Image (tube, helix red, strand yellow):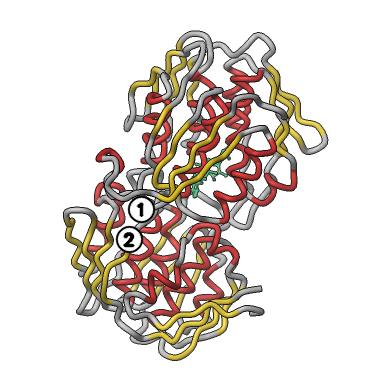
Amino acid sequence: MDAIRIQGGVPLHGDIVIGGAKNAALPLMAASLLTAEPLTLPNMPELADIATMSNLLRQLGVRIDQSAFAFGSDASDAGATGRVMTLTAEKITSVTAPYDLVRRMRASFFVLGPLLARQGEAIVSLPGGCAIGARGVEMHLKALEALGAKIEVTGGYVHATAPKGLTGAHITFPKVTVGGTENLLMAAALAKGDTVLENAAREPEIGNLAECLIAMGAKISGMGSGTLRITGVPRLHAGRCAVIPDRIETGTYAIASAITRGRITLRGTRFDLLEGVFSVLRQTGVTVEPTEDGVLIAAENGLVGVDVVTEPFPGFPTDMQAQWMALMSTANGASMITETIFENRFMHVPELRRFGADVNVHGASAIVRGKKKLTGAPVMATDLRASVSLVLAGLAAEGETTVNRVYHLDRGYERLEEKLGACGAIIERVSGG
Ligand code: UD1
């Protein structure tokens, strides 16, 4: 198993180009199931999760073609750096998403809504729990039932049927769910009549999906608000929609700059995608300046501790919580980090303590007392964002750090060592860690 080895304590200077957002790309890929015509997605990142979704979609009958992106070839894709993926679901050959794939990546559950809407049937494995919490899917299922689907759960699989198609309904989510909102947007796009989704998630990835569905002929309004209105259409057609920049990759490298007291310009990204993080980053004393195609992050001086509470967008994202904790471990003074989205998302705490970080967890909150210096250590990754927080701590720490089990990182960070290395980080991948 690969590991990442870092010699820390080097301030990072340079440019990092941000890729397309994993969490936007995955539902956009699933949306290809809604039409027999091609869906073209520029700015597709190269990540393990994208390969897993490609495998699943191929098993369902989707043809996937990829090409390198010709920079500047299309003004609407400005800033895009990744590949262009074209997905064609001319004929769906299977409606089953097997346990083996769904278990590896919860986002496989995104095929449920589109398969049900187009084929009238979907058999999708229940994702099961994961490292950060129970992560149920009952809100997805209840909402699909409200659209007229019959849902049975047997043998660990959700068997959903709607032989006469889905019918629009008024749905109020009891709690904000990103995946639930996305599954329902896709299902409602082909339902008969109007659907209203209240207490819908407002994450930028939802806006990207709505924009993509509209390009395919869907009728959706209310983007950016908590109420989405969808008027179903009988069929969707070919479409093209660029994947938005990855706001979590943006925030992670912003912290890489801050935690090493460096100066990095993040390119190909957008300030507005991450205002919640940038505003607290400024409160710590870090300079955050929007640039023409991204953001400059500079932190020559000491930082002060600032409290955060994770919340649905536009609040502070749970996917940045572990990275924030690494940063606060090096700030002056104490800070409190409260996690409200997932019940078990502090697995990085014992690993951060191995660097000498002073962190105490009390229920859903962690108190971090900043240290003048962290020291490198061998550590173990537990999930995607926890792993990258260990890389960040390793970049700041004096001496050598080895982060084991880096396959978690490959799910969500493209060419991580290369991007950090180009800014002066002494970082390498070693096999067999
Ligand atoms: C998405 C993101 C993930 C991010 C999370 C919260 C993708 C692929 N993943 O995950 O990176 O951390 O949003 O911003 O986009 N819940 C239920 N029942 C349900 C659905 C959700 O109890 O039916 C709970 C979850 O366990 C969690 C909370 O609701 O505690 C929010 O989950 P949700 O917004 O659905 O997260 P995901 O879509 O799984």
Image quarter for residue 223?
A: top left
For the point 52% across and 9% down, the residue is 192
Q: Nearer the viewer, residue 373 or 271?
A: 271
Residue at mark 1 to residue at mark 2: CA–CA distance = 8 Å
Task: Please indicate whether residue 126 sits to the left or right of residue 412 in the image.
Answer: right
Image quarter for residue 226?
A: top left
Image quarter for residue 396?
A: bottom left
Q: Is residue 408 visible?
A: yes
Does residue 94 sit above or below 2 in this rendering? above
Few, some or many C-alpha atoms within 10 Å of disc 1 (few <14, some 14-19, many ≥20)?
many
For the point 37% across and 40% down, the residue is 242
* Quadrant of the drawing holding the C terminus: bottom right
Is label 1 or label 2 in front?
A: 1
Task: Please indicate whether residue 178 sits to the left or right of residue 214 in the image.
Answer: right
Residue 81 position, x and y percent, is 36, 53
Q: Which amino acid, mark 1?
A: Thr
| Disc number for residue 81 | 1
**Which badge, 1 or 2, is on the more N-terminal residue?**
2
Q: Is residue 177 visible?
A: no
What count of labels does the image hold? 2
Q: Which element carries disc 2, helix, strand or loop?
A: strand
* Quadrant of the drawing holding the N terminus: bottom right
| Disc number for residue 17 | 2
Does residue 303 sit above or below 48 in this rendering? below
Q: Which element carries disc 1, helix, strand or loop?
A: loop
State if disc 2 and disc 1 touch (CB < 8 Å). yes
Does residue 338 sit above or below 25 in this rendering? below
For the point 36% across and 71% down, the residue is 327
